[in-house]
Amino acid sequence: MTDLTPVINAFIALVAALITAFVIPWIKRNTSAKDREELLKWVEIAVMAAQQLHYQLDGEERKKYVLDFLAQKGYDVESEEIENAIEAAVLKLHQEMEEKK
């Protein structure tokens, strides 16, 4: 009878290498894209809520509301990505409001 242990070990090593080379990077790419997509949705919701609920307040107070909302969702509100996402959502909201006029 032939010993198949080296063949099985080689097959396991090959599968592990393929998972490391292709599957793990694919999962990381998709997860981060989904995370960004979710972040942008929450930012847009927070900006619209701030506009609707706190329209009488100035921009800094509404921004504080948005940052507090995002912090409750577990986001790092000190990051530049959050600042940029908020500014983009505010611009989008203003453009939509102008189109309705």
Image (tube, helix red, strand yellow):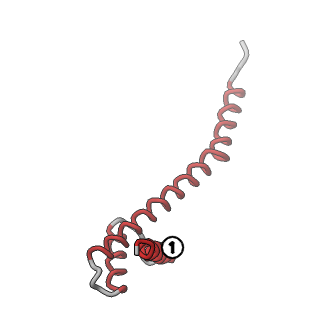
Asked if residue 56 shows in the view, the reply is: yes
Q: Position of residue 21 (x, y in %)?
A: 67, 47
Check the image and report above or below for 9 versus 91.
Answer: above
Q: Local crowd at mark 1 within 10 Å, few (<14), some, or many (≥20)?
A: some
Image quadrant where residue 86 sits: bottom left
Closest to the observer: 23 or 72? 72
User: In the rendered view of the protein, which quadrant contains the N terminus?
Assistant: top right
Image quadrant where residue 15 sits: top right
Residue beneath the point at 58% across and 54% down: 29
Asked if residue 86 shows in the view, the reply is: no
Q: Position of residue 18 (x, y in %)?
A: 67, 41
Closest to the observer: 34 or 27? 34
Which amino acid, mark 1? Glu
**Element type at mark 1:** helix
Image quadrant where residue 43 sits: bottom left
Q: Position of residue 72 (x, y in %)?
A: 32, 68
Q: Is 68 placed left or right of 12 in the picture? A: left
Residue marked by disc 1: 81
Closest to the observer: 40 or 14? 40
Q: Is 100 placed left or right of 80 in the picture? A: left
Residue beneath the point at 62% across and 51% down: 25
Q: Position of residue 97 (x, y in %)?
A: 41, 74
